[in-house]
Amino acid sequence: MQSQLVFVYGTLKRGGWNHRWLDGATCLGEAQTVALFSLYAHQYPFLVREPRYPVLGELYAIDDSTLSNLDTLEGHPDDYRREQIPVRDGHGTLHLVWAYLHSSPQGGLLANGCFIETDR
């Protein structure tokens, strides 16, 4: 069983309504994107390659089965696209991780790079 790293920034975070999809995954703590992105939110967030601010989220170590399940949840590759991006964890360590990005966001642009469930 191989371990993958995934960066989550929305409903998959602790306390989010989709967090159950990460059941049993190891949370490695908070992380932040190295590159600048934008976050939009309608009913859930959209991470977009528009340089605006670093995005805050959480880092998880997951197995291949969980990654496949997340692909299903996120509609990869037809809705969200899973891509590798660099993030820094809370200790400043750089990681190359999977994240789900969207090419055509919906909803309003968030003022900063932190999605909170009430943003929907």
Image: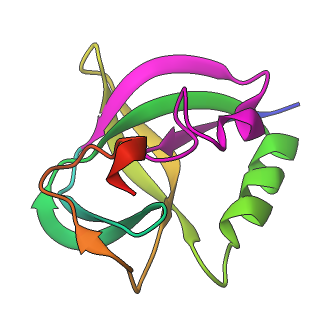
Indicate left or right for 47 with 34 as reference. Answer: right
Estimate the x, y position of residue 84 in percent, counting from the top left: 48, 56
Indicate left or right for 13 with 74 as reference. Answer: left
Estimate the x, y position of residue 60 in percent, counting from the top left: 58, 29
Which corner quadrant of the image does residue 52 belong to? bottom left
Q: In this view, which residue lies farthest toward the top?
A: 91
Query: What residue is rendered at 38% in x and 80% in y?
Result: 106
Q: Answer whether residue 62 is magenta in the image.
A: no
Query: What residue is rendered at 54% in x and 46% in y?
Result: 11
Which corner quadrant of the image does residue 95 belong to? top left
Pick the quarter of the image with the C terminus.
Answer: bottom left
Above or below: residue 44 compared with residue 118: below
Q: Pick whichever, 88 or 18, lies toward us.
A: 18
Estimate the x, y position of residue 70 in percent, counting from the top left: 73, 53
Q: How is the image coloured?
A: rainbow
Above or below: residue 13 compared with residue 106: above
Query: What residue is rendered at 45% in x and 75% in y?
Result: 102
Q: Pick whichever, 108 or 2, lies toward us.
A: 108
Q: Pick whichever, 30 or 45, lies toward us.
A: 45
Indicate left or right for 43 with 5 as reference. Answer: left
Pick the quarter of the image with the N terminus.
Answer: top right
Indicate left or right for 17 with 7 as reference. Answer: right
Query: What residue is rendered at 70% in x and 73% in y?
Result: 75
- Which residue range is magenta in the image? 5-33
Q: How many marks?
A: 0
Estimate the x, y position of residue 119 in percent, counting from the top left: 33, 52
Which corner quadrant of the image does residue 5 belong to? top right
